[in-house]
Image (cartoon, grey):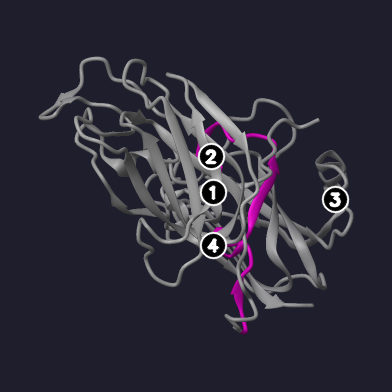
């Protein structure tokens, strides 16, 4: 069984456009750090004007009634299935408790609006990543509360993007986009970078902003499987190797399939060897956007598999097409 399986999208990721829109206090640690995709780090000798630098959100010690909180706008609306609250490196300054509420609103909600509880007030532990299984309704804002104060390294809201295609009709969609509901299902290797960057907006900012595998020392090739946001007819494909200059793949190909039975990811991976090849093996260039519109016939599909030969880094993959019912 392949261990590299992603069941959800992190709805709190800045790669989706998620951002903090209101908060009580972040005297010691900028509240935006809490949403970073990278794992938290600790630098023993790093201090700033407010004291010890910490890789996360940290409020000052509260000397009044109440508790600290932040309101976060999700980049895409969706449903949360799992909450990760990570207090890594916060040992004597983590909050004893936390809670999370959600709401769907067309404008920025107020603290006293009618929020729905997703995670009730729950005890936290220091220097530990805790995961909580939940089931939210459709939301686009969350209110994260810590009691009474302290530091949280990371907040991750794992779930599914729910994009309303009926209200946003277009001829062509970026079917692979994270913001529309595209997601990575599995891959054989992702030694460097953040694999979810592959489906995010814009061009890669650095070589670390993309999918990169280790140097292959055995026969074969590397691959990644993506579930599209909606079943569709693929019209165009873009493979961007931005910033990958001495480590871009020599070649790439793309397979696709229409899958109704996804009983196991292992079955999906095993069967992907026989998927249709919509893009035959193509030579790639360093730091370049490769656009392909002369594609092989495939019919409606909802999964794609990017194969790279033999290894290397790809910054972005864009699968563009029209919807099918």
Q: Are marks 3 and 1 in contact (CB under 8 Å)?
A: no
Of all residues, the one furthest to the front in this rendering is 65
- The label on residue 77 is 4
Going from N to C along the chain, the mark reached first, 4 or 2, is 4
Mark 4 or mark 3: which comes first in sequence? 4
- Residue at left 69%, top 36%? 188
Is 62 placed left or right of 195 in the picture? left
Q: Position of residue 278 (x, y in %)?
A: 76, 64
Q: Secondary structure at mark 4?
A: strand
Instruction: Tell me which residue sits at (41%, 24%) in the image.
Output: 96
Q: Of the numbered discs in the image, which one, if any, rests on residue 271?
A: none
Q: For the residue labelled by badge 2, is the local secondary structure a helix, a strand or a loop?
A: strand
Q: Label 2: which residue?
A: 120
Which one is in front, 1 or 236? 1
Q: Which mark is residue 262?
A: 3
Q: Nearer the viewer, residue 84 or 172?
A: 84
Graded by Cα atoms within 10 Å as few (under 14), some (14 to 19) or many (20 or more), the crowding at tag 2 reads: few
């Amino acid at each position: 069984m392949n261990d590299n399986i992603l069941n959800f999208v992190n709805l709190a990721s800045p790669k989706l456009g998620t951002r903090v829109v209101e908060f009580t206090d972040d005297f010691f640690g900028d509240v935006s750090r809490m949403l970073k995709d990278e794992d938290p780090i600790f630098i023993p000798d790093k201090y700033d004007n407010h004291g010890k630098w910490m890789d996360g959100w940290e409020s000052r010690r509260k000397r009044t009634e109440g508790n600290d909180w932040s309101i976060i706008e999700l980049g895409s609306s969706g449903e949360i299935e799992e909450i990760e609250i990570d207090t890594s490196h916060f040992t004597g300054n983590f909050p004893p408790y936390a809670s999370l509420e959600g709401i769907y609103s067309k404008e920025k909600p107020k603290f006293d609006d009618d929020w729905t509880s997703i995670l009730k007030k729950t005890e936290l532990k220091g220097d530990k990543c805790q995961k909580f299984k939940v089931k939210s309704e459709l939301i686009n804002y969350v209110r994260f509360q810590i009691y009474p104060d302290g530091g949280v390294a990371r907040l991750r809201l794992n779930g599914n993007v729910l994009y309303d295609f009926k209200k946003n009709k277009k001829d062509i969609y970026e079917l692979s986009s994270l913001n529309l509901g595209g997601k990575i299902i599995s891959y054989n290797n992702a030694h460097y970078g953040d694999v979810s960057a592959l489906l995010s907006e814009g061009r890669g900012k650095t070589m670390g902003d993309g999918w990169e595998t280790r140097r292959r020392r055995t026969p074969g090739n590397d691959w990644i499987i993506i579930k599209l946001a909606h079943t569709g007819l693929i019209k165009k494909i873009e493979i961007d190797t931005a910033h990958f200059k001495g480590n871009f793949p020599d070649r790439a190909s793309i397979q696709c399939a229409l899958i109704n039975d996804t009983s196991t990811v292992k079955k999906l991976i095993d069967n992907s060897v026989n998927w249709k090849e919509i893009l035959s093996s193509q030579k790639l260039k360093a730091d370049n956007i490769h656009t392909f519109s002369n594609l092989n016939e495939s019919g409606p599909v909802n999964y794609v598999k990017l194969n790279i030969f033999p290894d290397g880094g790809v910054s972005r993959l864009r699968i563009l097409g029209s919807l099918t019912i």
